[in-house]
């Protein structure tokens, strides 16, 4: 449980790093090159499950951006959690 919360904080923390607001979009490529590389193999296996849980809980949306790149978009609920 502790590891999943750590990964959730890393995912949402990217929005904080970039001063993201509701609707801010971050490409999955960014996570692949930064967050996922910093995780150990067990944590890497959990990344997708944690991201899906954040989506299911309404903190982020997964979508394809205008340029065709896939990524996460911060919701109002996610914004509130990031800056709580």
Image (cartoon, rainbow, N blue to C red):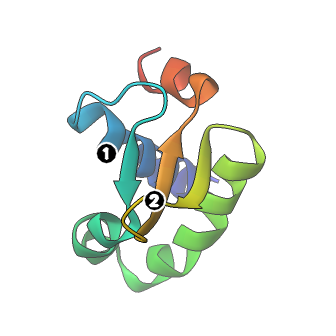
- Is 61 positioned to the left or the right of 53 in the image? left
Q: Is residue 80 above or below residue 75?
A: above
Residue at mark 2:
65
Q: Residues within 10 Å of mark 1 (few under 14, many from 20)?
A: some
Residue at mark 1:
14
What residue occupies the far top of the structure in this picture? 84
Tell me where residue 82 appears, x and y as whole percent: 44, 26
Q: CA distance from mark 1 to mark 2?
A: 17 Å
Which of labels 1 and 2 is toward the front? Answer: 2
Counting labels gives 2
Q: Which quarter of the rendered picture does the N terminus lie within?
A: bottom right
Q: Residues within 10 Å of mark 2 (few under 14, many from 20)?
A: some
Decide which of 61, 44 is in the foreground and name it.
61
Q: Quadrant of residue 40?
A: bottom left
What residue occupies the far right of the structure in this picture? 56
- Is 74 positioned to the left or the right of 24 in the image? right
- Is 54 positioned to the left or the right of 16 in the image? right
Q: Residue at x 58, y 32 (%)?
A: 75
Decide which of 5, 27 is in the foreground and name it.
27
Q: Quadrant of residue 34?
A: bottom left
Q: Residue at x 46, y 50 (%)?
A: 6
Tell me where residue 70 appears, x and y as whole percent: 47, 68
Tell me where residue 68 appears, x and y as whole percent: 43, 71
Q: Are marks 1 and 2 in contact (CB under 8 Å)?
A: no
Sequence order check: which comes first, mark 1 or mark 2?
1
Q: Which mark is residue 84?
A: none
**Which structural element holds mark 1?**
helix
Q: Residue at x 48, y 33 (%)?
A: 23
Tell me where residue 66 appears, x and y as whole percent: 42, 58
**Which structural element holds mark 2?**
loop
Q: Residue at x 46, y 61 (%)?
A: 71
């Amino acid at each position: 449980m502790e590891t999943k919360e750590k990964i959730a904080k890393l995912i949402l923390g990217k929005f904080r790093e970039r001063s993201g607001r509701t609707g801010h979009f971050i490409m999955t490529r960014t996570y692949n090159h930064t967050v996922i590389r910093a995780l150990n193999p067990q944590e890497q296996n959990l990344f997708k499950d944690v991201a899906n849980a954040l989506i299911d809980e309404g903190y982020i949306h997964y979508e394809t951006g205008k340029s065709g790149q896939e990524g996460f978009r911060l919701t109002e609920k996610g914004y509130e959690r990031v800056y709580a």
